[in-house]
Image (spheres, rainbow, N blue to C red):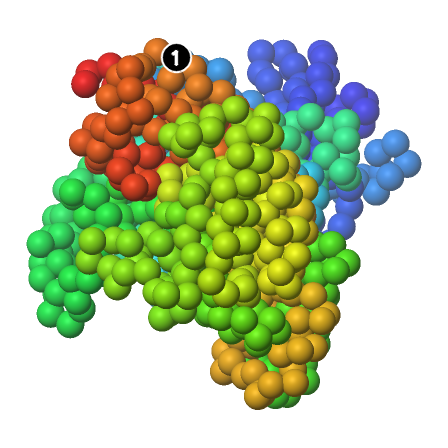
Amino acid sequence: MKKQIQDLYGFQVSSIKKLVGYDNANYLLECDNERFVFKTYPFTKDTYTLLNAETEILNSLQDSFRGSIPKPISTISGEYITVVELENRKTICRMLTFLEGDFLGESSGNLKIYTSLGTFLAKLDNELRSLNNYIIKARKWEWDLQYLHLNKPMIDAIPHASDRSIVRYFFLQFDQMVVPHLPFLRKSIIHNDANEWNVLTNGDKICGLIDFGDLAYAPVINELAVAITYAIYDKEDPLLWAAHILKAYHKITPLEEIEIHLLYYLIAARLCISVCNSAQSRLDQPNNKYASVSEKPAWKMLRKWLSINPTGAENYFRRALKFPDQKTPSIQTQLKKRNINLSKALSISYQKPIYMEKAAFQYMYDAYGNAFLDAYNNIPHVGHSHPKVVEAGQKQLSRLNTNTRYIYDLLSDYAEKLLEKFPSSLNKVFFVNSGSAASDLAIRMAKHFTGKESLMVMEHGYHGNTQIGIDISDYKFSNPKGQGQKQHIIKTALPDTYHGRFTKNDGSAGAAYAAEAIHQIDNAKSQIAAFISEPIVGCGGQVPLAMGYLEKIYPAIRKQKGLTISDEVQTGFGRVGDHFWGYEAQNVIPDMVILGKPMGNGHPIGAVVCTEEIAESFSRGVEFFSSFGGNPVSCAIGLAVLDVIEEEQLQQQAKTVGDYYKSLFTDLKNDHPCIGDVRGSGLFLGVEVVKPGSHIADTQLAQKIKNELRAQFVLVSTDGPGDNVIKTKPPLIFNKDNALEVVEKMDSILRSH
Ligand code: PMP
């Protein structure tokens, strides 16, 4: 090769060293007193054309940037880009000057350097703006943020399903937030790849920029989105570093408000492009380490990016550039507006209510720019705004939404997939739109099937907001403002091993509580149509039924020809970790199961699952019809939720993270006598706050913990008859770091108490 180079360029080469490269070969040439970079590329017409365009741009920039960008060197015959046979292959060659300096990636990386980077890029873009090049203009490839979707096929190369979901989430955000603005953004030729291995530094200054192979005719803001991505992706406080680059750039070329508005999503998109390409190249060229240099920090930042409120990032950038604050109505204004048309019967969480704007996975974003860790909401089971669920809904909504009086595949497909999760005896499903509608229907069906009226319900139980729902919910009918217990309702004591009379959770407490309940059954005025309970009683304060309890109760109910109903609205779909359904922990199979909340990840779906006999009996009565129950959009969403639970192994995640989370709370209990009990399973936990040395509720302290956690951007709630049980049941993508954050914050609140 040496001789060929010497013949082509007419100078003596004393040594050749191969350098790392992304998708071409680079060589460092030592000549007399000078160093050059010799680059070779496998011949294609496109590469040849593009390299000529790049050379044209590099040459046009020489007057202003000589010494700080590479200068093309021509062959003896005057060609900057030449085609030769190298090692028997048709190869494109070119020569550039070598630039001195330390890579930004190896520098100390202080804030001054990033200010200098902003200045450098602004000056460069000012020059590039005056240039025109139709080859660059026509270029369309995956590293240009405008064409983010060209990266979509590569998402499948990312090994973990949960990681793929993060990328898909940002693709969807890009579609919604960026794409509508793209045609209106100012455009120019930009360098488009100011990453830390293309930027050269000398002390606190940027002294050079190399690799113009990614030149694009693109929105000007993309230049900054790219530079900022690589500047921040290994930093603890990414917005701070980003702001320094922006400020410096803005001083020379004022940025527009819309550009700042899009920046958060553009940076996320660049991180996505990086991880997609790293994953793909790990498959395609496993030996090319350079192709995935950015992978680790990009993933770290992509996950961290989710914990930053997009509005918060925008506000931060705006403040740095001295744009006026955006006007967001105050909470008082919002409350006033809400109270004009809505009843105060609807409660609002926290002393300081939250004006919520957006959410992603385990994070929720308020309108003022704060991000909250959601350790409370179980409805977004697989994560807020999960892309698979959103896409399923969007796609079906734009295709067909109708009702069960027509035939469509999604209804039977979803029913089949859902029923696969149940034992074979539970093989019929009725779709409705809420947990309340499900419990209401289940009770109607039970009465129809048994011909009986009485219902046995659990102390502190809650099953829904319909009249039947309220009738069977001690939590509501026994409330001082409630309607009281109806004649046909038999309430049985909560088999609670913390507060109750029987405390040994080895089966003996369960048997003792069951014996009392069986006594009630045997002595009931009339026979019982159904017994309904949750396996872990949420409104009772996350109280798991004592072990062995249902195993004794179910046969007693069945003996007098009644039905057993498990309310899995809170505990279903893998949340409890060890099992997919909460009743499984009690070694029983109910006759009916009611489903809701997590089933549609926030989309309103509920269901009653029952045996063939019960469904058959019901079908002999009047027609059952629900306008919305089982509609194709709901079915598509429900299917997506089941798919995500499987793909992302979320039941396993609930088990692993839940066990860890519970162990952290148990440690906390050992340090703080005001924590009386830690209970529940998987990601369905309760932490009971009491007066030290007693089981007496400390409601005030529990409320204080909840509100102070809210002030520290962590969401939990309280429940139980004394409203003193901290309830945590986060989306199942909640991870161990999230768990630690909640418990550490709770610890510090209790220490300063
Ligand atoms: N059952 C249980 C156990 C519940 O927690 C709830 C809601 N909190 C319901 C039923 C009623 O569900 P929905 O609010 O969706 O009607």
* Quadrant in the rendering for residue 334: bottom left
Which residue is located at x 34 percent, y 29 percent?
688
Residue 155, given in percent of the width and then of the height, sits at: 64, 48
Can residue 558 be seen by looking at this rendering?
yes
> In this view of the protein, can residue 600 be seen by the observer?
no
Task: Indicate the secondary structure of the residue bearing disc 1.
Answer: helix
| Other-residue count near label 1 (Cα within 10 Å), few / some / many at <14 / 14–19 / ≥20 | few
Mark 1: C-beta under 8 Å from nearest atom of ligand 1: no
Residue in view at x 66 percent, y 57 percent = 559
Using the rendered view, name the quadrant where residue 226 is placed. top left
* Residue 118, x across and y down, in percent: 32, 34
Determine whether 409 is above or below 133 in the image. below
User: Which quarter of the figure is the N terminus placed in?
Assistant: top right
In the shown orientation, is residue 583 left or right of residue 1? left
Residue visible at 14% across and 48% down in the picture: 325
Q: On the rendered structure, is 353 left or right of 46?
A: left
Residue marked by disc 1:
670
Q: Residue at x 42, y 39 (%)?
A: 542
Farthest residue in the right direction? 88
Q: Is residue 62 left or right of residue 414?
A: left
**Which sits in the foreground, 591 or 332?**
591
Of residues 637 and 504, which is closer to you in this image? 504
Q: How many marks?
A: 1
Amino acid identity at mark 1: Asn
Q: Is residue 77 above or below residue 486?
A: above
Q: Residue 115: give x, y in percent of width and height.
A: 29, 28
The vertical placement of 407 against 379, above or below, is below
Q: Position of residue 213 (x, y in %)?
A: 58, 41
Closest to the observer: 73 or 165? 165
Q: Is residue 168 above or below residue 395?
A: above
